[in-house]
Image (cartoon, helix red, strand yellow):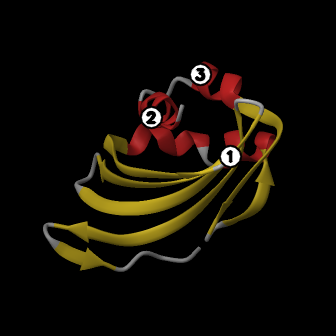
Amino acid sequence: MIRSYFAAYQASDRSVIEAVLTDDFTFTSPYDDAIDRATYFARCWPNSTLFKSIAVERICEDGNDAFVLYRCETLDGKVFRNTELHSFQDGRLRSVEVYFGATYKDGVVTQQPLS
């Protein structure tokens, strides 16, 4: 399910994502504090068009939760790795918590704005 989620995000296939998110889905990141499903689609979903590639590197499961380590490359050549905690309920994705890693451009760490 996690690999399908990332593949759908990269392909900008919103219908797949809508089908796997629970009605009470929340999304948390350094920019977002447990935003709801509607806010996620309004604020975060448009970013799906910015990625050249998303590669899942590792998934570690613990009951209904799983940590995911992934590597992204943006269309403008930035590369970064993030970790996310995905929580599931009844076979659907209930929440995602994103932990940002460093971002690189041409092999050098670049500073990212916090807002």
Residue most extreme to the left: 106
Q: Amino acid at mark 2?
A: Arg
Where 91 sits versus 31, above or below?
Answer: above
Q: Is residue 36 left or right of residue 83?
A: right
Q: Position of residue 87 (x, y in %)?
A: 68, 49
Residue displayed at 47% across by 61% down: 83
Q: What's the residue type where badge 1 is placed?
A: Asn
Q: Residues within 10 Å of mark 1 (few under 14, many from 20)?
A: few
Q: Amino acid at mark 3?
A: Val
Q: CA distance from mark 3 to mark 2?
A: 12 Å
How crowded pointer 3 is (Cα within 10 Å; few <14, some 14-19, many 20+) is rated as some
Per the image, label 1 sits on a secondary structure element best described as: loop
Q: Quadrant of the C terminus?
A: bottom right
> Of label 1 and label 3, which has the lower sequence position?
3
Query: In the visual, does 108 lie left or right of 97?
Result: left
Residue beneath label 2, please? 3
The numbered mark at residue 16 is 3
Q: Which residue is mark 1?
A: 64
Chain-order first, disc 2 or disc 1: 2
How packed mark 2 is, by other alpha carbons closer than 10 Å (few <14, some 14-19, many 20 or more), is: few
| Image depth: mark 2 or mark 1 in front | 1
